[in-house]
């Protein structure tokens, strides 16, 4: 059952590049008004009258809290929230300072808690809403050098599951998409990347398509958790 997407409003975190940008582009094409949050939009190629941006470091929790309250006041009828912001920090646990760990968890996990702290009551007031978390296969199986990253992703997965239980009677659906390797600028600062073949990685547009599929599905059906993997997993090291 397809739904009319006209006049709907979506909030997308991490909207300046990668998966968040692909989601924003597709939703705008489908008639959505998109409010994007990201650290920096100076290099974002998307310019559209239906795309409103707010530059904000998600690790700055106090200012993030103020910003989301401002957005909710300005857009009281938010239809959905897609949380796709995230960074990667890989290595042995002893390599990181306490400050490194706190900053990473704030940006990649606590920020989601802060956003939902404000968004869920607004959606409850509207008696409707959809929340989609872009997780990771690292939330399903932890790997070497991934203590920080998997901690954040396992935490986000727990948040999604708990919110689903809390919000289902309020007509708010919560879904989680766990992609494997996605070919995005995420890997620009990493020492590894997906292999070069098309079968070695998912494209950001593939994740955007799944988001749209969830948003246009029967609202009485919940996509609890969707796991997407490239057909042939392969890594290359720089």
Image: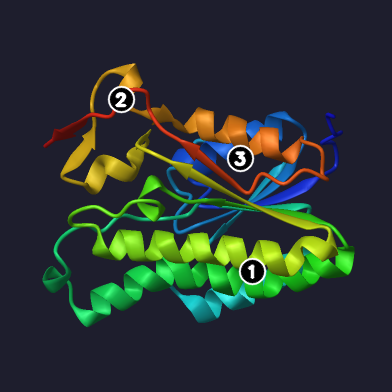
Q: Which callout, 1 or 3, points at the residue further toward the start of the chain?
A: 3
Q: Quadrant of the N terminus?
A: top right
Residue at image mark 2: 200
Separation (CA) of disc 1 from disc 3: 19 Å
Q: Residue at x 24, y 22 (%)?
A: 196
Q: Residues within 10 Å of mark 2 (few under 14, many from 20)?
A: many
Left or right: residue 94 versus residue 167 is left
In the picture, the disc for residue 116 is 1
Q: Is residue 104 above or below residue 238?
A: below
Percent across and percent down for residue 66 are 62, 77
> Residue 23: image x %, image y %?
58, 38
Instruction: Determine the secondary structure under disc 2.
Output: helix
Q: Nearer the viewer, mark 2 or mark 3?
A: 2
Q: For the residue labelled by badge 3, is the local secondary structure a helix, a strand or a loop?
A: helix
Numbered mark located on residue 168 in the image: none
Query: For the residue carrying disc 3, how many other residues have a C-alpha within 10 Å: few (<14), some (14-19), or many (20+)?
Result: many
Q: Is residue 79 above or below residue 31?
A: below
Q: Where does label 3 land, which residue?
A: 24
State the colouring used for the structure image: rainbow
Residue 61's spot in the image, x, y percent? 50, 77
Q: Is residue 97 above or below residue 87?
A: below
**Residue occupying the point 52% across, 28% down:** 206
Q: Earlier in the sequence, mark 2 or mark 3?
A: 3
Number of labelled discs?
Answer: 3
Name the residue at 30% across, 25% down.
200
Quadrant location of residue 159?
bottom right
Which of pointers 1 and 2 indicates the residue nearer the eye? 2
The one nearer the camera, 171 or 39, is: 171
Q: Specify whether residue 46 is in view.
A: no
């Amino acid at each position: 059952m397809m739904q009319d997407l006209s006049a709907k409003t979506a909030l997308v975190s991490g909207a300046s590049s990668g998966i968040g940008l692909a989601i924003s582009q597709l939703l705008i094409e489908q008639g959505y008004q998109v409010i994007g949050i990201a650290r920096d939009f100076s290099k974002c190629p998307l310019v559209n009258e239906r795309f409103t941006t707010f530059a904000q470091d998600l690790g700055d929790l106090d200012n993030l809290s103020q910003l989301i309250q401002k957005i909710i006041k300005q857009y009281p009828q938010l239809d959905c929230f897609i949380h796709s912001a995230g960074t990667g920090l890989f290595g042995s646990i002893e390599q990181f300072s306490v400050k490194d760990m706190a900053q990473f968890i704030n940006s990649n996990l606590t920020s989601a808690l802060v956003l939902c702290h404000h968004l869920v009551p607004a959606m409850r007031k509207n008696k409707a809403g959809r929340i989609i978390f872009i997780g990771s296969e690292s939330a399903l199986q932890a790997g070497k050098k991934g203590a920080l990253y998997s901690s954040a992703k396992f935490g986000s997965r727990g948040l999604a599951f708990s919110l689903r239980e809390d919000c289902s009677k309020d007509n708010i659906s919560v879904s989680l998409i766990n992609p494997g390797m996605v070919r995005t600028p995420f890997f620009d600062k990493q020492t590894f990347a997906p292999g070069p073949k098309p079968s070695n990685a998912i494209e950001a547009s593939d994740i955007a398509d799944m988001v749209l599929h969830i948003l246009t599905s029967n609202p009485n059906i919940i996509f609890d958790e969707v796991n997407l993997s490239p057909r042939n997993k392969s890594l290359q090291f720089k």
